[in-house]
Image: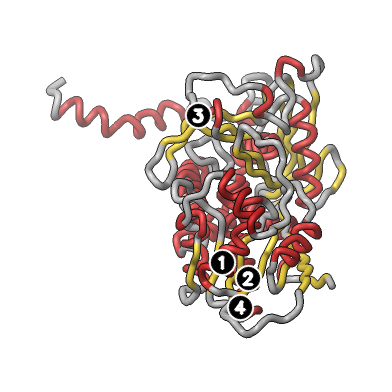
Amino acid sequence: MATKAKKGSAVKSVRSTKSPKKDKVVLAYSGGLDTSVAIRWLQEKYNLDVVAVSVDVGQPGDMDKNIERAKTIGASNAYAIDAQEEFANDYVWPCLKANAMYMQTYPMATSIARPLIAKLLVDIAKKEGAKYIAHGCTAKGNDQVRFDVSINALDPKLKIIAPMREWVMTREDEIEYARVHDIPITVKKACPYSTDENLWGRSCECGILEDAWTEPPEDAYEWTTSPAKAPNTPQYVTIKFAKGVPVALDGKKMGAVALIKKMNEIAGKNGVGRIDQIEDRLVGIKSREIYESPAAIVLIAAHKDLEKMVLTKDVASYKRLIEQRYAELCYDGLWFSPLKEAFDAFVDKTQEFVDGEVRVKLFKGSCTVVGRRSPHSLYDMGLATYAEGDEFDHTSAKGFIYVWGLPLRSVAKIQKKL
């Protein structure tokens, strides 16, 4: 039976036959090999009742099949939660308004999905009366920090189990474990990469990509056309913003999820959104990461440009300082921190007049803003023009320069003895 969760997340639950009373663990369940064998491992090692939770933030896969598989493996209850709307409105849009890009290049698709998943895991843990939450993160990645810190921030009483940090199993070991324990899994041809996807972007790492000198092969990309093979004619898109949030494409009003998906499609077709960077992981490791974020790259570029038109110089300058720290907080798993909450209040205040339209040109991997307009524009043609209609008081320039340069003249006269 499907019900509505807070903020639009649709929850579907399937409960298997009752088992003897045990403590419960809520497992973040992807439906893949790791978390499938984790169900049985948690039962054997900790003697826990496992509640599997699959959260849809825009990744591929069948949520219904996930919860059926979890139930078959032995989960006492299984939930499929459609959280795409909540993800877009409450996690993606705040980051867009903050122009949040880690290391100034990565829109942090994976980073900002984790606190939402953690929140939903905590919600289910409270509903089920569970004492534990489990996830499939490894000891070398950032996600373990994001999950653990977010869960602790939302409910410090919950204990966390991370099977992949405790056991040491190769893929072959896991497949054999599944065979011995009659765990139904679908073993596909081994992918040379480790990938993660949601509405806001796709990440790809491992394999040949670990050689930082090697150009990523085309098979590392799925969302974007090679710029060399992209259309030979530029495509123009007009994006409408209301209080810093995109609300329409080319005059067509759209909800958050539909707009992001459409922008991913349009920009990806034109080869826009590829990112190749050496990244500073939170755990202290430098990694080579390949990302595809077509919608994010275009929407953030358009949003930044519109802000230049409507924000005062001092607000825009100070906001840039906030944006960098904001991105670091999101990347570092501190979404639910007081500082992040304070930054959100500041950012929301700056967006009061970020209304208008931005026209972008997409062509063979490039995204260029070619037009912008706003009812709150601070751009005054009468002051900016050098042609007829110039309203600027040219006689005021000399007095302004005198006052502006006075401190430097004093330094030159007194300290430099000029």
The crowd level at tag 3 (other Cα within 10 Å; few <14, some 14-19, many 20+) is: some
Q: Which is closer to the viewer, label 2 or label 4?
A: 2
* Camera-side residue of 216 and 231: 216
Give the quadrant of the C terminus: top left
Q: Is 393 placed left or right of 285 in the picture?
A: right
> x, y percentage for residue 302?
67, 36
> x, y percentage for residue 116?
62, 60
Q: Earlier in the sequence, mark 4 or mark 1?
A: 1
Asked if residue 414 is positioned above or below residue 49 in the image, the reply reads above
The residue positioned 81% from the left and 45% from the top of the image is: 248
For label 1, the residue is 42
* Camera-side residue of 303 and 297: 297
For label 2, the residue is 50
Q: Earlier in the sequence, mark 2 or mark 1?
A: 1
The numbered disc on residue 126 is: 4
**Residue type at numbered disc 4:** Lys
For label 3, the residue is 210
The crowd level at tag 1 (other Cα within 10 Å; few <14, some 14-19, many 20+) is: some
Q: CA distance from mark 3 to mark 1?
A: 32 Å
Q: Secondary structure at mark 2?
A: strand
The residue positioned 78% from the left and 27% from the top of the image is: 269
